[in-house]
Amino acid sequence: MDRYAVIGNPIEHSKSPEIHTAFARQTGEDIEYIRLLGNPDDFNGDVRRFLAEGGQGLNVTVPFKETAWRLADELSSKAHTAGAVNTLTRLENNRLRGDNTDGVGLVRDLTVNQGFRLEGKRILMLGAGGAVRGVMRPLLEQNPKRIVIANRTASKAYSLANGLLEYGQVAGCGFDELDGMQFDLIINGTAAGLKGEVPKIPGSILANGGWCYDMLYSDQATPFQEWGNERRAGRSLDGLGMLVEQAAESFRLWRDVLPETTPVIAQLRNARN
Ligand code: ATR
C-alpha cells in the first residue's frame, strides 16, 4: 500500500486525510493517508523520515509551503511561479517534485462547481501572503477584466502586483485606496479570519449582486462569509470546495486518476451539519 501524508503545524484539524480516503475508496486506489505534525525547525528532516518509511507523496500546508518550495529538487511551472509548494511527489532516487494545486483548486471550485465565469470580471483579492501568491496566475489565466490586490501592508500588494505585470490587468493597493471602486468578486486570501477578524475594507465596493469567496474554511460560516451575507452578496462562499479541488488535483498527480469531487464536498458539508 502506498503511503501519503499532509504535513503542517498545526495539523490536527486538517480534513485532507478524510478527503483523500474518500478519493481512494471512490477510485479503488489502495493508499494510506495520515497527518504529520511538522517541526518548524526541521521540516526537511520530517519529510526525509517520511520518505525513508516508504512515503510516496505529501501535501504541504501552513506554514511550510515556502520551505517545501526550497526543498523540492524540481518544480512544476505553476509551483515555480507561485513560490510555494503544496504537493510533493517522490521521484526515482528519492528526488522530490514540487507542485502547487491551490490555484487550480480555486479556479475549478469557482468556475465548475459554482458556475462563476471569471472572464471579464472585476476581482478584488485581499491579502498578499503565500496563500494569495499561489493562486494569482491561474486566476489571471482566466482573463478577468482586472484583479486588484489589496493588503493591510500596502507595500506587499504593490510588490506582488509588480511581479505579475506581464498580465497587464493587475494592480496593488492598500485597503484605504479602495473607496470608489466596484468588484464583481471579492476573494479573501488573508489570515484575518483565523483571529475572527475581517479585513477593514469599505462595504460599498461590492457590486450589486457581486460574490464573496473566502479561501478559508471552518466548521462555521467564516467572518468574511458573514461580511458578504450582511452586504447582500449574490453568493458568499467558504473555501471547502477549493480544499477538495486542490486535493483532487494532488491525487491526480500522484495516482494519475482525477476523482469526482461533488460527492466528497457533500460528504464534508453533511459532516459539518
Ligand atoms: P499565508 O501564507 O497564509 O498567506 P502570510 O504570508 O503570513 O500567510 O500572509 C497572511 C496575510 O493575511 C497577509 O496578507 C496579512 O496582511 P499583512 O501583510 O499586512 O500582514 C493578512 N492578514 C493577517 N491578519 C490580518 C488582519 N487581521 N486583517 C487584515 N489582513 C490580515
Image: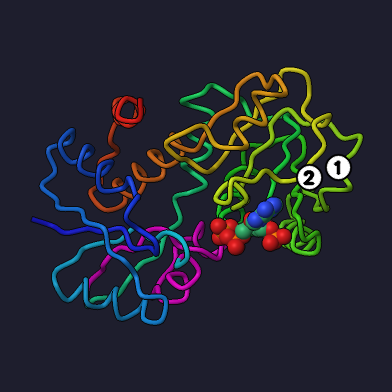
Task: Decide which of 21, 116 is in the foreground and name it.
Answer: 21
Left or right: 180, with 139 as reference point: right
Q: Which residue is mark 1?
A: 178
State the extent of the magenta-drawn residues as a range: 65-92
Q: Earlier in the sequence, mark 2 or mark 1?
A: 2
* 240 over 65 or under it: above or below: above
Residue pictured at 30% horizontal, 63% vertical: 89
Quarter, ligand 1: bottom right
Residue 185, image x, y percentages: 69, 31
Number of numbered markers? 2
Front of the two marks 2 and 1: 1
Residue 79 drawn above or below residue 252: below
Residue 30 shown left or right of residue 44 in the figure = left
Side of 37 where 144 appears, left or right: right
Task: Look at the numbered disc 1 and say if its residue's Cβ is closer than 8 Å to ligand 1.
Answer: no
Q: Residue furthest left?
A: 1
Q: Nearer the viewer, residue 1 or 200?
A: 200
Q: Quadrant of the C terminus?
A: top left
Image position of 101 (left or right of 191): left
Residue 66 image offset from top left, x and y in percent = 50, 69
Is residue 43 shown in magenta? no
Q: Secondary structure at mark 1?
A: loop
Query: Where does residue 11 sit, x and y in percent of width and height?
Result: 35, 58
Residue nearest the observer in this picture, 250 or 152: 152
Please tell me whether residue 103 is drawn above or below residue 9 in the rendered image.
above
Residue 130 in view of the camera:
no
Which residue is at a point 41% across and 81% down the rendered structure image?
41
Disc assigned to residue 169: 2
Question: Disc 1 marks which amino acid?
Answer: Leu
Residue shown at 47% from the left, 76% from the top: 70
28 vs 175, nearest the viewer: 175
Which element carries disc 2, helix, strand or loop? Answer: loop
